[in-house]
Image (cartoon, rainbow, N blue to C red):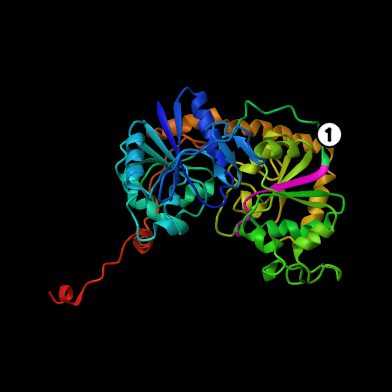
Amino acid sequence: MKILMVMHTFNNFGGIINHCEHLMAGLKELGHEVNFAYLKGTKTVRPVEIPSVLKEGWEIGIGSGYPVHQGDGWMAPYYSYKVKESIDKFVDDANKHDIVIWQSIFGFKNKDTEKYKDWLPMIENVKAKQVVIIHDANLKKLYPWISLFEKHFAGLACVHPAAYESADFMSTPRALILNPQDIAGVPPTPQFAGRENKILSIQTFKRWKRVDDLIRAVPYMKNVKTLVGGYGIEAAYMMSKDKCKEEYFATRQYDPDVTPDREGKRIWENAENSGNFDYLGFISGEKRDEILSTSKFLVDPSWSNTFGEHFNRVVVDAMRIGAVPIAVNFGVSNNEEGNGVLLKAGVNYCMLKKSYTPKEYGEKIAEYCDMSEAEYMRIVQNNYELIQQFDRKRIAQHYIDLSAGKPTGYLNELLTKSNFDPNLPKNSRNMFDEHFEKKETLSLDEFFG
């Protein structure tokens, strides 16, 4: 089959880059022809020159074959949804494929498309089967307008249970399809003795990722090295000396155990002053794996009161490399016990509670770093078995099955609309009209006929 993988440009790609690359690689390993379509909102379309030597942070995508950077995206030929000829070319090219997979359909809604909808043929005129990926739990809140086009979609691929639930108002069949990983390429990893009391935390700094919870806890982890990677708006606030948010200062409101020498200072500054903290910025997948291979833990600090059960791609990255994840109960599950559909506390990961103070948070991580080898390796072995579910060839086949309307995914089922709240279609239409529709203004002559 011929498959087109479509990706928009937008801020803070995060794990979507790796999802895209590994899904393309998995589809190719199944024998399919896969092409990459990069969408931009430029006023012109220019040829892209790819250098023979890549700068630091860039790597060749294992699926697309193009240079890619975790912060900057791809260096690849592109289509513009602001240029008619490019829109027409996209439609023509898409219709030469059997399946079109939308990695980022939400990307059509941005400042460049206000009162502009000439891009609609890129969905409405495509006759290939279209599969839309739901990467988060924000569908109802941020892009419910895609439901207006559901008659053009063959299926929704939801990457975790929270995303699965968020799509319950759409009639398009949906499946829970996990993030694709290179399980066949899992390298030999150092045994327990080769791992240091070192933790890695890497993500896009969004509010719900709660990186500040980890940063506040750093001074309470005296014998643990904390490495933090990634970037985003919240990182900019935390690092800023003159625009730091109030909540990113060390106060008794946020840290009842804060010591006088740290009180009133930025939590980022306190972490740096601890001597056990390094900020890495954007790092490549290769660098991430290199760090994880000598680290005991990866920490995913994210949690939400409303998202429900979700797990970020980096948790599985850690499992691949034999590092044990540490995560928050209301991040990887929707309950106090921290047990979700996939991940179980004490079985697949070490749990933190969202209610922990910074001192409790840090001391619990330090306690995990003193875990016995037998206990540590028990979790590692559990996860080596679990990650087979994330094998990119298996996941790629799930996408093929979803496009064909077959029960598939981790739960081997397809669900359709179960939420009939009348406000949801209304909100979808209102969001679309407010952003994309031009408001017609009548002259006095037209008004009075």
Residue 303 visible in the picture = no
Residue 422: quadrant of the picture: bottom left
Q: Residue at x 78, y 58 (%)?
A: 217
Residue sitting farthest toward the top? 31
Residue 112 forms part of the magenta stretch = no
Q: Residues within 10 Å of mark 1 (few under 14, many from 20)?
A: few
Quarter of the image with the C terminus in it: bottom left
In the picture, measured across the screen, residue 350 lies left or right of residue 437, that is right
Q: Nearer the viewer, residue 124 or 383?
A: 124
Q: Residue at x 39, y 42 (%)?
A: 173
- What amino acid type should be assigned to the residue bearing mark 1? Gly
Quarter of the image with the N terminus in it: top left
Q: Nearer the viewer, residue 316 or 12?
A: 12
- The location of residue 122, given as percent across then percent down, is 34, 44
From this view, report whether residue 432 is shown above or below residue 446. Answer: above
Q: Which residue is mark 1?
A: 194
Residue 204 forms part of the magenta stretch = yes
Secondary element type, mark 1 = helix
Q: Nearer the viewer, residue 249 or 72?
A: 72
In the picture, measured across the screen, residue 365 lies left or right of residue 70, that is right
Which stretch did the figure color magenta? 197-207
- The location of residue 147, given as percent across then percent down, is 37, 51
